[in-house]
Image (tube, rainbow, N blue to C red):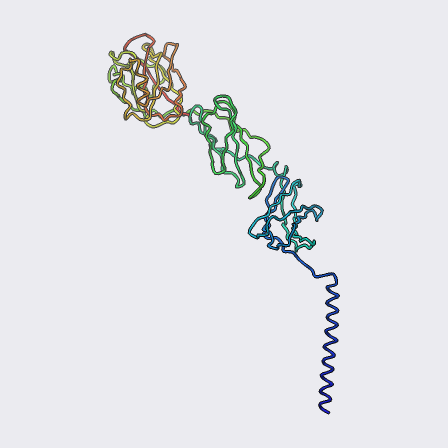
Amino acid sequence: MKSIYKISGLFFLLLTVIISCTKDDLAFKEYLKDGEIVYPGRVANIVTKPGNLRTALWWNPSPDPSITKYVVYWNNSADSVVVTPTTHNPLDTIKVTIPNLKEYTYTFTVYSYDAQGHKSIPIEARNVRVFGPLYQSGLLNRPYNVVDPYLINSTNSVQLNFKAPDTINVNTVVRYTNVAGSTVDKILLPLDTAITLSDYKPGTSIQYKSSYIPGKGSLDVFAVSDFSVFPEIVPRYVLCNRSLFNEVHLPGDAQTYESGTSISKLWDGSVGPQGYPNIFHSAGNSGMPHVITFDLGKIYFNLSRIEETGRDCCNNPDRFEVWGTADISNATTTLSASDNGWPAQAISKGWTLLKDVTRTDDGKNAFTSELDNGGKPIRYIRIRIKHVTTGDGNYSNMSEIRFWNIQ
């Protein structure tokens, strides 16, 4: 009896398994009646590049060799672009530029497709901003240094000073007129806070316009719509400190009439034409032309103006040259100042002719002349007196000399 029960139990268990398997199999076939679901490999690492009414998407391709195209959708899938893969190496980069967009913030969705039309799980690039005229209208030109906008180096050389720019600044175009009358554009780079115009034509306007990118890797550069006008370059003359002046006596220099009429009388602070003995008075054997030398006490990089005041009566220079140099270590001339070869020798010794002055009056009152040293540093001055109003062949008299430096 026990054996009969055992056989009946085994038969019942086997029947149950058969019925169960058949039911599950039918359910699985029903589930797969439309075929197995296939998902091609999706792209990775989408990077967006901002642009002017356009954008670019860069991504690493899927290594899935079955992929035949990528499709990028935007505007709720109303717009799309198809990209044909050129590689399946995930270390490569596929790039697509999407033009003709509006200035707006978009979401782009990328699908991978195989030849049977199966598509991958989507990958999105969200909050992609596209830039345009509205962004450009908000850009401002890089600010200049309001406290110290410029430094005049010489007659035709000026340094323009700017503040540090925004980090997205690309460059600033500085537009000016050069000495030849031509319009010139120079580029101020973001890391530079100053730019020098070495051939600037004084009195002409300077304009500037900055350019920016909206973000790293931008496809396009946006320039500010209009140029701004840089502050007018107005020479600022600063009187040289005459308390620093000192006499210098080089070989061949003219002697003075007496100790009380020395060269230092030229910076003693008197005002207007002076009478003897409160003047510089050369000795009676000086000859004509003759030279005197003195030290300004420091180097000036833009010595630009001289004012000379004569004596109250006579022997005032009406033709004289102003020479300058930064160092007199080897600046001694061996020729007489009356020798026609003296100017050439002076130049060979490092002297620069700053001005050849001609006065047409009686030489008494203060007379101002602009100097042109071409931006050379000047500390030592030589005055070569070529003629005096009386026509005297030895004596020259002066009351005062002043110099200005442009800053």
Is 283 placed above or below 186 here? Answer: above
Foreground pick, 137 / 255: 137
Residue furthest out toward the bottom: 1
Foreground pick, 206 / 185: 185
Q: Which of the image's four quarters has the N terminus?
A: bottom right
Is 72 placed above or below 368 here? Answer: below
Q: Quadrant of residue 337?
A: top left
Q: Which of the image's four quarters has the C terminus?
A: top left
Is 287 placed above or below 235 here? Answer: above
Foreground pick, 177 / 391: 177
Foreground pick, 399 / 89: 89
Question: Residue 196's spot in the image, x, y percent?
Answer: 45, 30
Q: Quadrant of residue 302?
A: top left
Question: Residue 218's spot in the image, x, y percent?
Answer: 57, 42
* Position of residue 23 in the picture relative to residue 244 (left or right): right
User: Looking at the image, can residue 171 be seen?
Assistant: yes
User: Looking at the image, can residue 278 be seen?
Assistant: no
* Position of residue 345 in the picture relative to residue 369 (left or right): left
* Position of residue 23 in the picture relative to residue 360 (left or right): right
Is 121 placed above or below 177 here? Answer: below
Question: Residue 392's spot in the image, x, y percent?
Answer: 30, 8
Question: Residue 43's spot in the image, x, y percent?
Answer: 61, 53
User: Which residue is found at the position 56% from the left and 40% from the top?
Assistant: 213
